Image: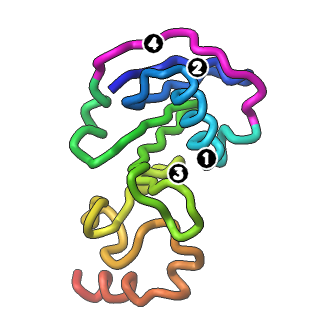
Amino acid sequence: MNKYEIDYGHGVAYFWTDALDARDVQGQFYRLAGECFGIRKSISAYEVLQRYQGVELPIPYRDKGATHLLEHSGDIILFDDAHRCPNGNSWKLLSETGEWCSCQQRGSPELACSCHHFWVENHDQLCQCKASREQSR
């Protein structure tokens, strides 16, 4: 992967991607950052300050099926951009709130709901998985 240090106007972000082409990197950064609550409204500039080629993801995020990682202002978001959520956004394996995807195929089900991905709106009201998980303890 390649790691980019990007000044986005109101801070610096670190962005991991396989892309090398400057336009591809910028487009991927804007698209994925636009899906993150903590950065999307803070982007007022774009300048690559540094590029590191051939780097690996940080150890806790390796071997998770991630295609991108975005780190900014203490938030870390891990993406599987090869898959999409029903709303069209890229699949977040780790959200900005620190929740791991619980999808059986692409997530870490032992860390969260074994039935659903973390983005399910009103999850506790809609799903019985929480109750069944508590009963199994």
Q: Earlier in the sequence, mark 2 or mark 4?
A: 2
Residue 16: percent from the left, percent from the top?
Answer: 42, 29
Q: Are marks 4 and 1 in contact (CB under 8 Å)?
A: no
Report if residue 45 lies within the magenta region.
yes
Q: Which residue is mark 3?
A: 97
Judge by depth and name the residue closer to the eye, 6 or 100. 6
Residue displayed at 37% across by 30% down: 18
Please rate how many residues cluster around mark 4, counting C-alpha atoms within 10 Å: few if below 14, some from 14 to 19, many from 20: some
Q: Earlier in the sequence, mark 4 or mark 1?
A: 1
Question: What colour-coding does the image apply?
Answer: rainbow
Q: Label 3 vs label 4: CA separation?
A: 27 Å
In the picture, residue 22 is in which quadrant?
top right
Q: Are marks 1 and 3 in contact (CB under 8 Å)?
A: no
- Residue numbers of the magenta segment: 42-55
Instruction: Judge from the rendering whether residue 53 lies leftward or rightward of residue 4; answer left or right.
Output: left
Q: Which residue is mark 1?
A: 36
Residue 6 is marked as: 2
Q: Nearer the viewer, mark 1 or mark 3?
A: 1
Judge by depth and name the residue closer to the eye, 20 or 80. 20
Residue displayed at 39% across by 82% down: 130
Q: Which residue is mark 4?
A: 51
Q: Earlier in the sequence, mark 1 or mark 2?
A: 2
Judge by depth and name the residue closer to the eye, 30 or 7. 30
Q: Label 3 vs label 2: CA separation?
A: 21 Å
